[in-house]
Structures are given as C-alpha cells and as structure tokens.
Image (cartoon, rainbow, N blue to C red):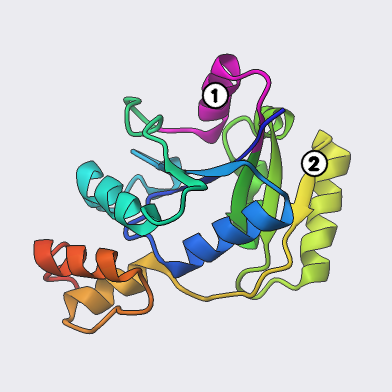
C-alpha cells in the first residue's frame, strides 16, 4: 500500500518552511511521495486577495523541480467553488482506494481542525501529520492529538523537525516593499516573483 503525503496551502508564495516540513514528513514516515496541492478558494481566506492560480502553480513547480519525491497536484485548482479538505480526500480515496494519505500541517492548523468542514471525514480518510509551530509546545500538541484521537479516532503523527517561523504574508509584504526574500524561498521562486512583480505595491 502506497503512503502519500499531502502538503496543502495557497502557496502565496511557497517557501522553505513548506519544503522542510514536506521533506521531514517524507523521511520520518517513510512516505513514497508528497503531493503539493495549491488551494483555489480556501474557506479560511475568503476575504484575502490571492495571487492568480497559474502564478502559484508555477512557483510550486519551480520549488519542487529538483526533488523526485515531490509532485504537484492540481486537484483543488480544477475544482470550482470553495475547496474543502474533506471533499479533496473523498475524491482522492475514490480514485486511489489502496493509498494511505498523510495530511501534513503545522500545529496551529491541528488546533483549528475541529472547526473545519467535516472533520470526522478528514480523520477517517487520512492520517494527520503535525509539526510544532508558533507558541505551541510539543506537550500541548500531544494533548491536542490525544483529544482528537478520543473524539474522532484520529491517527496523528507528530514530527521531530525544527520550527521555522516563515509566513507567506510577511514575504509578500517584504517583496512589495522592495526587500529581499532570498533564502526564505528557493532561488527560482525568488527570481519568478521578481520577474513578474507579483507582490508589487504591497506594504
């Protein structure tokens, strides 16, 4: 049975923390590959201006081009309307019933999952992979994992990985203000942002 990781997000832009989290998941859980899955219209960012799909898709392609274990998935970009994780997992499992999916996230998302659309469906169809992020401690993360396990029967893996505090909105503001974001994103992504002036005018 294949084990496939899912790294979702708007990737606006994709940055080094995304890549390190995906690589850590790949190695620590012996995954066969990780799908990078740009969101089209995530429900928690309805009021946010999101860079056009094709730019975000291209940045993901550039970021993962040198890693044969990373792959772009367009499944959410191709779906109309709001993109919910539960719907995505149902579609994936219907096409690939023998695959075990591992949904990768930061700890902040793990604490919010109870308010997501159909959380029970998500926990039934995928393992959850979480890494410490922000102010949460590893013990708080373990406590939340135990709570979700008892309530939903969730299977949750906690990664042993360094915490990198990189936020896409900060990178957009930095790039818009003419500041360098080199080393925060892969060089090819940095060049693409500069070439297309993606975040110009942001302060």
Q: Which residue is mark 1?
A: 92
What is the quadrant of the C terminus in the image? bottom left
What is the quadrant of the N terminus in the image? top right
Select label 1 or label 2 by which is in front.
1
In this view, 140 is above or below 1: below
Residue plotted at (79% across, 39% down)? 154
Res 96 quadrant in image: top right
Percent x, y for residue 171?
32, 72
- Marks 1/2 in contact by CB < 8 Å: the verdict is no
Percent x, y for residue 91?
52, 20
Q: Nearer the viewer, residue 166 or 109?
A: 166
Query: Where are the magenta residues, as a range?
Result: 83-101
In the rendered image, the residue lying farthest to the bottom is: 179
Is the residue marked by circle 2 packed among few (<14), some (14-19), or many (20+) residues within 10 Å? some
Percent x, y for residue 61?
32, 49
Residue plotted at (62% across, 69% down)? 133
Q: CA distance from mark 1 to mark 2?
A: 18 Å
Q: Nearer the viewer, residue 115 or 3?
A: 3
In this view, 202 is above or below 117: below
Q: Which residue is mark 2?
A: 155
Is residue 89 a member of the stretch shown in magenta? yes
Residue plotted at (49% across, 61% down)? 19
In this view, 198 is above or below 119: below
């Amino acid at each position: 049975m294949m084990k496939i990781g899912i790294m979702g997000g708007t990737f606006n832009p994709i940055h080094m923390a995304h890549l390190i989290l995906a690589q850590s998941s790949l190695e620590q859980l012996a995954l066969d590959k990780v799908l990078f899955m740009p969101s089209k219209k995530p429900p928690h960012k309805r009021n946010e201006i999101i860079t056009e799909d094709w730019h975000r898709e291209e940045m993901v392609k550039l970021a993962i081009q040198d890693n044969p274990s990373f792959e772009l998935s367009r499944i959410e970009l191709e779906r109309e309307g709001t993109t919910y994780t539960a719907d995505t997992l149902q579609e994936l499992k219907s096409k690939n019933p023998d695959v075990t999916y591992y949904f990768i996230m930061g700890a902040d998302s793990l604490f919010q999952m109870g308010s997501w659309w159909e959380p029970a469906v998500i926990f039934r169809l995928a393992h959850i992979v979480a890494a410490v992020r922000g102010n949460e401690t590893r013990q708080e993360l373990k406590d939340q994992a135990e709570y979700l396990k008892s309530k939903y029967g969730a299977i949750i893996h906690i990664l042993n990985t360094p915490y990198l505090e990189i936020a896409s909105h900060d990178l957009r503001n930095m790039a818009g203000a003419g500041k360098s974001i080199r080393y925060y994103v892969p060089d090819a992504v940095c060049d693409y942002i500069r070439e297309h002036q993606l975040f110009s005018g942001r302060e």
